[in-house]
Amino acid sequence: MRFAFTDQQLEFRNALRPVLDKECTTSDLRSAFAAPAPRSDRWNTLAEMGIVGLTVPEEHGGLGMGLLDLVLLLEEAGRAGLPEPLLETTALAAPLLGATAGSRSGTWLDQIAAGDVTAAVAPVDPAAGPAVAGADGADLLVVHTVTPSGRPELHAVPASAATTTPVASLDPTRRLATVHWDPSPATLLASGEEAHVLLADLADRAAVGSAALLLGLADRMIVLAAEYARERHQFGKPIGSFQAVKHLLAGAQVRLEFARPAVYAAAWSLDGGEPDRSRAASLAKASASDAATEAARVSLQVHGAIGYTWECDLQLFLKRAWALAEAWGSAADHRQRILLSLLDER
């Protein structure tokens, strides 16, 4: 099989990059760090481009596309450090709502496509803790619970029906919060086996979507480090001319290039319902987490102590990369998941 993105997918990616270059500058990111907000004029721009509603069915005002159509856009969002919850709203909440029947889901989908709603999605793995990324200020909370009888349930809870308590985060734009809510028939999306299947798909989509963001973050950090290495002089030469620095950057770039096809293949597997899609999702997240943490380590080493400082642009992307590398399962978690899936086949 020869895989390649379509011209339409590439054109969509190429159209998004200059928009983010203009509307999501490092100055904008500093403003978002100082005063995080779930929605901004950038969000409205993305909605007008059709990106926010890309995975929303056409009958609800969206484009009805899949994760493979979105993965390049998420990569661009990572490259720009986009503060808004594109992963949670478009990659996770919209497909889940689209897979459930009922007028409540349809109403939420209409609002997502219009750019009027941002969503937060609770982690599937209880070991991830109670904090939900984006819950502080989100309009819609997609959460789950288990009944006393052991039956899983998925709920779509409007922000007005829940109480959120902010939690400090390494990356303040992720707006972590704990969520307290009361399950009710009015918020129920799915239960039992249907909820179990949807939660499994949600975990896979979250792994691949966050992996795509990490690809963009890794690329941006390597570029920032290379630019700094050309400008910073020692012993009368740019430090980028030293072989040790070249090797550091080249090693990070190689790891990124190996992670990219794993992420793209996982998106293709999920859209196609391939039997090994969960394993592919874990491989994508493990590879992208490794690539991003290596890019963070190398870029910080190239910058030296200045890379930690507020004045340095690098720290804006370091924090996001470190946070996302652990979100929706760390590299170690996903390697263990792959190992267990292989052992189950014996």
Image (spheres, rainbow, N blue to C red):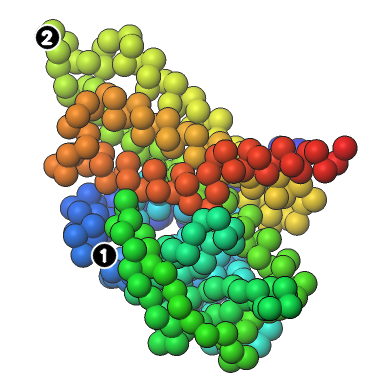
Quadrant in the picture for residue 39: bottom left
Quadrant in the picture for residue 286: top right
For image coordinates 44% across by 74% down, the residue present is: 179
Residue 231: give x, y in percent of width and height: 17, 24
The furthest residue to the right? 346
Q: Which mark is residue 36?
A: 1
For image coordinates 48% across by 34% down, the residue present is: 291
Question: Looking at the image, is mark 2 or mark 1 earlier in the sequence?
Answer: 1
For image coordinates 64% across by 47% down, the residue present is: 281
Left or right relative to 293: residue 313: left
Q: Looking at the rendering, in which quadrant would you find the N terminus?
A: top right
Q: Under tag 1, what secondary structure?
A: loop
* Distance CA(mark 2)–CA(mark 1): 42 Å
Q: Out of 129 and 269, give the one closest to the viewer.
A: 129
Specify the amino acid type for callout 1: Pro
**Of labels 2 and 1, the one closer to you:** 1
> Mark 2, residues whose alpha carbon is within 10 Å: few (<14), some, or many (≥20)?
few
> Mark 1, residues whose alpha carbon is within 10 Å: few (<14), some, or many (≥20)?
some
Residue 31 visible here: yes
Q: Out of 137 and 129, give the one closest to the viewer.
A: 129
Left or right relative to 314: residue 202: right
Total number of numbered labels? 2
Discs 2, 1 touching: Cβ within 8 Å: no
Residue 143: give x, y in percent of width and height: 55, 73
Q: Out of 188 and 101, give the one closest to the viewer.
A: 188
Q: Under tag 2, what secondary structure?
A: loop
- Which residue does the numbered mark 2 point to in the structure image? 236
